[in-house]
Amino acid sequence: MKRNIIRSKYIIVAAVVAGGLFFDACSKSFLERDPQGSLTGAAVSTKDGIDALLIGAYAALDGQQQDVAAIGTGGPWEAAPSNWIYGSVAGGDAHKGSDATDQPPISLIATGQFDASNGFFNTKWKVLFDGVVRVNTLLSLLPDVKDMSAGQLTQVQAEARFLRGHYYFELKKMFGKVPWVDETHITDYKQPNNVDIWPKIEADFQYAYENLPPTQSQVGRANKWAAAAYLAKTYVYQKKWTDAKPLFDLITTQGVTAKGVKYALTARFEDNFDSETKNNSESVFAIQMSANNGTGQISNGNQGEMLNFPYNSPFGCCGFYQPTQDLVNSYRTNANGLPFLEDFNDHAVKSDMKVLSTAPFTPDAGNLDPRLDWTVGRRGIPYLDWGNHPGRSWVRDQDYAGPYAPKKNVYWQYNQDKYKDANSWAPGSAINLVLIRYSDVLLLAAETEAELSNLDAAQIYVNMVRTRAANPQTIVYKYIDDTKPMGGFSTTPAANYVVANYPAGAFTAMGKDGALKAIRFERKLELAMEGQRFFDIVRWGTASAELTRFFAYESKITTDVTGGKFVVGRNENYPIPQRQIDLSFKNGAKTLEQNAGY
């Protein structure tokens, strides 16, 4: 399979050998490594050397850039860039899945009972800072490069700063109090975390926005508009609505992909989660995944998602990441095709909980948003072209984690020879991980407009997303023949799909608070199982109410979230890993401070 941007597993250039570049793995990361390592400036202060370092800085995006043992991390899922654990499981989109004995640190994260000793946080911290180190190494060498033009150097710096902005954005939303280390700290990474780094993140994205071209020769590289989207999202996280609005106005009217295609929602919702239709008009910035790329590993093939396939199924492993009933109920629509914003759990979607796969079961007959069945695998509904989901037989422990399966990360059967990667004990795939897609941009723009009391403008953006949800191409259809799922789909919808736009003036009639509630709910529907939910409800200040409600409801269905809680003033940020605090001592004093409540 042709890869859109060359991906390197390793980053540090140790020497120039036989006219090429020799790559060596870092043995440690951030505070556990010598920042200079074996790198010599003369060896890489050339165009070829800088290009290799930039490739390595991109390669860190997938969180799986090295054999995890080489930098002392745990399982590859601990640093998955999708944030399926930290954003979706922690936010109520999904259960951990599997059974109670498997990966218990995730259970603590799912129920809000985590602390600084949880090794998952240390893995995530180290992998993100490894990306920062790669960028800083590159930037520190640029002044010594003699065989590149000023324009070429500026573009490299812009791409590098875009990547550093991404790594720090992830660190900031995860951990809150994060130390800023840049190319001026290349020999001393032990910096304090007592200063807000949002302005630094803004500056990196601003530089990238001003200096990146609108299109790129390689689709996986960041362009001007990807930087604009990240900068706007950075403003949204800080509630800088007046700064965010002009950027959204430009992105939505002028923005194009790295290939030069104007941003637009795809006709089919599912095209955003399909290897065959990746890098489409909705892909603002994506991690380029590949399968069977000759490495004999799945590190570039969604290795962070390797646990997240139905159990005892054709995929072989592993039964994690099961959508919650609370999420499924959110897709219920009323007679007008609109969601139940307040009492959706009072309109529960029928499930096959406690029903054997050998027993009869008829799926829910009520009104549903079709995005449900591209997000959640449920009994009796086509699971892509793998057949109707059989229910309990594909679930490791229903009582523990419910009856559902994830779907957005799953490849199709008919082209698995190209897009499945079987080079490990659990599958990988070539489905791109889209870090920002256009519907995310539209809903952030809607939120911005609503916060500025421009409610009609906000409604237009939300209705653009809902129009695509109502498109017949987004509907899931029954198979022509259930016994031959690869034989094609019929014209009969698999469920009673009823979804419609908000009528003219609806947001104005709701008022600002009501409009924001509708926008936030739309993000829940559109971006479910994409690692966004926890970070959204935290920045909205609704995490305590939402998760308290969620734990009370879901714990009556499954056993895994019993005792779950959200502690205000503590759980808004994950703890600074204790290992990193222990390593941060300089001149007899620690440089890293712990977040409140830990």
Image (cartoon, helix red, strand yellow):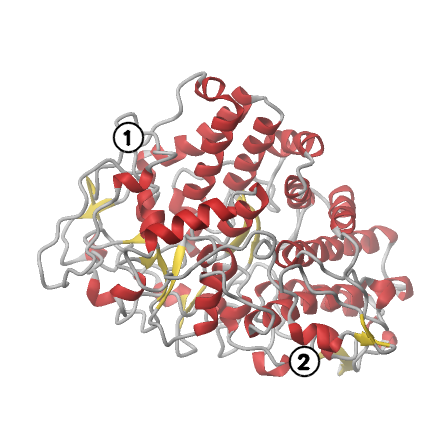
Question: Are circles 2 and 1 on residues that touch, CB within 8 Å?
Answer: no
Q: How many marks?
A: 2
- Note whether residue 302 is visible: no
Res 322 quadrant in image: bottom left
Residue 581 location, x and y as percent?
Answer: 71, 72
**Residue at image mark 2:** 25
Res 596 quadrant in image: bottom right
Q: Is residue 57 left or right of residue 423?
A: right
Among the two numbered marks 2 and 1 on one chain, the one whose residue lies closer to the N terminus = 2
Alpha carbon distance from label 2 to label 1? 55 Å
Residue type highlighted by circle 1? Asn
- Note whether residue 38 is visible: yes
Q: Please tell me whether residue 583 is drawn above or below residue 219 in the rendered image.
A: below
Residue 195 location, x and y as percent?
Answer: 79, 55
Element class at badge 2:
loop
Element class at badge 1:
loop
Labels 2, 1: front one: 1
Residue drawn at (46%, 55%) of the image: 88
**Residue at image mark 1:** 334
Q: Is residue 379 left or right of residue 515?
A: left
**Considering depth in this image, is 338 or 165 the residue closer to the camera?**
338
**Considering depth in this image, is 327 or 252 the residue closer to the camera?**
327
Q: Is residue 286 left or right of residue 29?
A: left
Residue drawn at (32%, 69%) of the image: 315
Residue drawn at (68%, 40%) of the image: 235
Residue 349 location, x and y as percent?
Answer: 24, 45
Residue type highlighted by circle 2? Ala
The quadrant in which the C terminus is found is: bottom right
Q: Residues within 10 Å of mark 1 (few under 14, many from 20)?
A: some
Q: Residues within 10 Å of mark 2 (few under 14, many from 20)?
A: some
Residue 476 location, x and y as percent?
Answer: 27, 44
